[in-house]
Image (cartoon, helix red, strand yellow):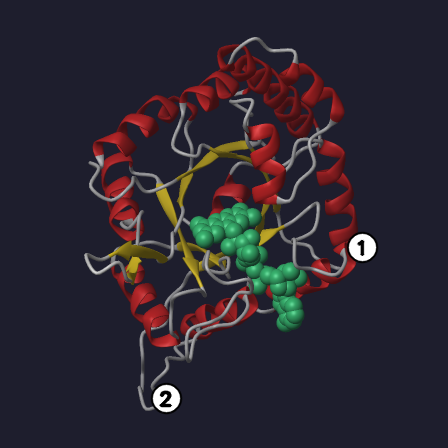
């Protein structure tokens, strides 16, 4: 089923969902199943699987020169999605990026997803590769997520890269896109960023999942501004329980979001990460309960490969 159909079928009851990362190359898919298994009791109608583009690494050769190599540390998004759908009988939502893909690569990727019976995709631009300051698309690749949404919407109308295809099969993907309550780091203002979000919806996106936030007011204000700007699709809040002291620095640095002073104060007081984990769970439970009371369609949790704290939150909330 499509995400929008799940939301309509829930008749206003908030649904539970979460995002997982493919394991590092060389690891077994069992680690993924082990992290999903305990969360199945909360009946997630869909599970997102992130996509990780290539990275450049430099290997020192015997002659002392550096050799640049391209590696993908977390491959397997499509395989994991197929395995999730077959094993758990829930919809898997693969993330798909502009970065690293030409439009032909994108088309082939989407054809595979369609043949696997995957009905939802999360369309994202992706970040710049670590060695570059700004995002660069591939030759004949999509530049912004909006362009990718247009390509997917085109395939939903039977438009492929080779225009000579006649009577072509129409895919029927439900397309999700990212939204940033605290603004995307590159956007000159939140107002501009919301206008770009509106373009993605106009191009065919049917729902939005937000970047993580730790202060619900950020989400409520964002949704209000989106609605004022004419964005009417569901806006699904993304939540992550803090689990370590390091994350006080890492999360703002990596995701460009603010942490409330009260949360920082409680984490700083903790003697060890076990105590931080508990603070993170309690904070996330309080956020979740308030968001449910506000009638959000889905609570979407970022598991980042660890599900035990999500389980603790969901046990208290669902
Ligand atoms: C829910 C969620 C899931 C994610 N999953 C992944 C994942 O699986 N893998 C991964 O690598 N990354 C993932 N990311 C991170 C994402 O790829 C980065 O945040 C990326 O920098 C932006 O992606 P986007 O799709 O929001 O880009 P876009 O919507 O293209 O926006 C990028 C920037 O460009 C601006 N912009 C958009 N259109 C235009 C235009 N026409 N002209 C000028 N400026 C424009 C926007 O305001 C914004 O500042 C995820 C993020 C979220 C919130």
Check disc 2: other Cα within 10 Å, few if <14, some if 14-19, many if 20+: few
Q: Quadrant of residue 198?
A: bottom right
**Ligand 1 contact, mark 1 (Cβ < 8 Å):** no
Q: Earlier in the sequence, mark 1 or mark 2?
A: 2
- Which residue occupies the foreground of this view, 64 or 105? 64
- Which residue occupies the foreground of this view, 199 or 62? 62
- Position in image of residue 251 (x %, y %): 58, 36
From the viewer's perspective, tell me whether residue 262 is left or right of residue 19: right
Which residue is tagged 2?
A: 163
- Position in image of residue 314 (x %, y %): 50, 21
- Position in image of residue 310 (x %, y %): 47, 24
- Which residue occupies the foreground of this view, 61 or 232? 61
Please give the name of the residue rendered at 31% of the width and 87% of the height, measured from the top-left corner: 166
From the viewer's perspective, tell me whether residue 29 is left or right of residue 125: left
Which residue is tagged 1?
A: 228
Q: Is residue 268 above or below residue 174?
A: above
Image-quarter location of ligand 1? bottom right
Q: Is residue 42 above or below residue 189?
A: above
Q: Are marks 1 and 2 in contact (CB under 8 Å)?
A: no
Please give the name of the residue rendered at 52% of the width and 11% of the height, measured from the top-left corner: 272
Residue 263 shows up from this direction = yes
Q: Quadrant of residue 133?
A: bottom right
Secondary structure under tag 2 reads loop
- Position in image of residue 206 (x %, y %): 56, 57
Please give the name of the residue rendered at 39% of the width and 66% of the height, measured from the top-left corner: 100
Please give the name of the residue rendered at 59% of the width and 15% of the height, measured from the top-left corner: 279
Q: Is residue 75 above or below residue 159?
A: above
From the viewer's perspective, tell me whether residue 179 is left or right of residue 119: right
Check disc 1: other Cα within 10 Å, few if <14, some if 14-19, many if 20+: few
Residue 206 shows up from this direction = no
Secondary structure under tag 1 reads helix
What is the C-alpha distance between the residues marked 1 and 2? 38 Å
């Amino acid at each position: 089923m499509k995400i929008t159909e799940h939301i309509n079928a829930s008749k206003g009851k908030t649904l539970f969902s979460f995002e997982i990362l493919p394991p590092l190359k060389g690891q077994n898919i069992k680690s993924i199943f082990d992290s999903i298994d305990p969360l199945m009791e909360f009946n997630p109608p869909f599970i997102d699987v992130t996509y990780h583009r290539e990275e450049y690494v430099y290997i020192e050769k015997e002659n002392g020169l550096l050799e640049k190599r391209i590696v993908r540390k977390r491959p397997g998004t499509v395989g994991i999605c197929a395995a999730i759908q077959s094993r758990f009988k829930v919809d898997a939502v693969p993330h798909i990026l502009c970065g690293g893909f030409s439009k032909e690569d994108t088309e082939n990727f989407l054809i595979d997803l369609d043949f696997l019976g995957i009905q939802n995709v999360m369309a994202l631009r992706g970040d710049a590769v670590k060695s570059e300051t700004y995002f660069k698309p591939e030759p004949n690749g999509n530049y912004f997520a909006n362009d990718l949404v247009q390509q997917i919407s085109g395939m939903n109308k039977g438009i492929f890269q080779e225009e000579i295809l006649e009577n072509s099969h129409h895919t029927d993907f439900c397309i999700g896109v990212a939204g940033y309550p605290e603004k995307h780091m590159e956007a000159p203002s939140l107002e501009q960023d919301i206008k770009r979000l509106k373009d993605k919806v106009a191009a065919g996106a049917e729902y939005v999942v937000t970047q993580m936030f730790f202060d619900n007011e950020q989400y409520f204000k964002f949704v209000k501004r989106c609605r004022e700007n004419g964005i009417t699709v569901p806006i699904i809040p993304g939540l992550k329980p803090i689990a370590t002291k390091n994350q006080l620095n890492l999360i703002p640095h990596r995701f460009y979001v603010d942490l409330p002073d009260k949360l920082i104060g409680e984490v700083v007081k903790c003697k060890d990460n076990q105590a931080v984990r508990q603070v993170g769970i309690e904070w996330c439970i309080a956020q979740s309960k308030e968001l449910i009371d506000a009638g959000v369609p889905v609570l979407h949790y970022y598991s980042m490969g660890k599900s035990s704290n999500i389980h603790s939150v969901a046990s208290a909330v669902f």
